[in-house]
Image (cartoon, grey):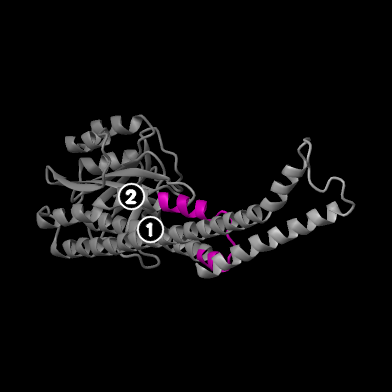
Amino acid sequence: MAVSGAASGFNYGSDKSGLVWGFLIDPGATAAPGAVPTATPIGAADALRWMAAPQPGQFIWLHFNLSNTASERWLHQHAGLAEEFYATLHQGSRSTRIEIADNALIAVVNDVLHGFSLDSAEISTLWAHVTPHAVISARRKPLASIERLRQDVLQGAPLRSSSELLVHLLRDQADVLVNIVRDAVARVDTIEDRLLAGRLTRQREDLGALRRVLVRLQRLLAPEPAALFRLLQRPPVWVDGEDRQDLRQATEEFTVVLSDLAALQERIKLLQEEIAARVNEDNARSLYLLTIVTVMALPINLIAGLLGMNVGGVPLAENGHGFWIVCGLIATFTTVAAWLLLRLQRNT
């Protein structure tokens, strides 16, 4: 098939139809040097011509930017997708799931944004419609996993079928999560080392922000393994046994990543409790020292208050050694108070 108007470079923009990128994938082709590539970039016009006369053994992948209002209009006019797909685009609930509709797979996948930072929970949704001959994906913001998948396709990753493309996407998503967990573990290790060294500054706030991000990630992504397990119970007939096995393996890998995410949250919680305990100990120690100083200063305050009253009969007022006598009394009472406090501390 002659391909014209193929995009030579891709970015996060889209053409007038809302298409960000498109690929014609031929599983039978080889990626050897000088051979026809397994994935050929195509534009919207080429995709229309191919969908009018699909070639056996080939499938296309079209990725749309829903921020472009022309995307949904083009899909309605030319793609022939199941109505359930359009319903999921406008549903308030964006929980991760994969459903079957009209012998097609409809996937709602939550993923982190391209250039995700652990300092903020930048998460968005990807919608995908998968049939034996076409994969239609759409998003509103650039996502990390779909970009990794595009790079793999450009580099000639072998793809047997459209369902394997979906499996590849799920594995890329798991890889992105692994990197997130790895970065989070490194930050937690650094904070833990500072805690053990006694250098507490803003670690508690940092841990709180990191834990909020991880909790949100887990809440949005945790339903995915369950959705895949439900799909594996009754998959479409065109998903062969090898693809089912790949889906099952991707589910297991994703479950392991989510378990690591939960374990990291528990570790952060324990560190927060340890930091809180140390802060409470420091506050208790400071309050104890303040109490000791207050009690030891009590005799001098009482005596100074009594002798400072402007009334008659103040003792030692006429005595030439009255000042030193009062100082002796203050020193005696202060020493007794200090001795009582030390004895009380030893008994406790």
| Residue, far right | 320
Residue tagged 2: 23
Dot 2 crowding, Cα within 10 Å, few <14, some 14–19, many 20+: many
- Check residue 227 in the rendering and tell me which mark sits there, or answer none: none
Q: Nearer the viewer, residue 43 or 3?
A: 43
Specify the quadrant of the image occupied by residue 126. top left
Q: Residue at x 21, y 60 (%)?
A: 247
Specify the quadrant of the image occupied by residue 90. top left
Residue span colored magenta: 192-212
Which three-letter amino acid code belongs to the residue tagged 1? Answer: Gln
| Residue, far front | 313
Q: Residue at x 23, y 65 (%)?
A: 249
Q: Is residue 159 left or right of residue 270?
A: left
Q: Nearer the viewer, mark 1 or mark 2?
A: 1
Image coordinates of residue 27 in percent, x first then y, are 25, 60
Q: Nearer the viewer, residue 105 or 93?
A: 93
Image coordinates of residue 59 in percent, x first then y, are 24, 51
Image coordinates of residue 98 in percent, x first then y, are 20, 48
Q: Nearer the viewer, residue 15 or 193?
A: 193
Q: Is-magenta flag for residue 95?
A: no
Image coordinates of residue 14 in percent, x first then y, are 41, 38
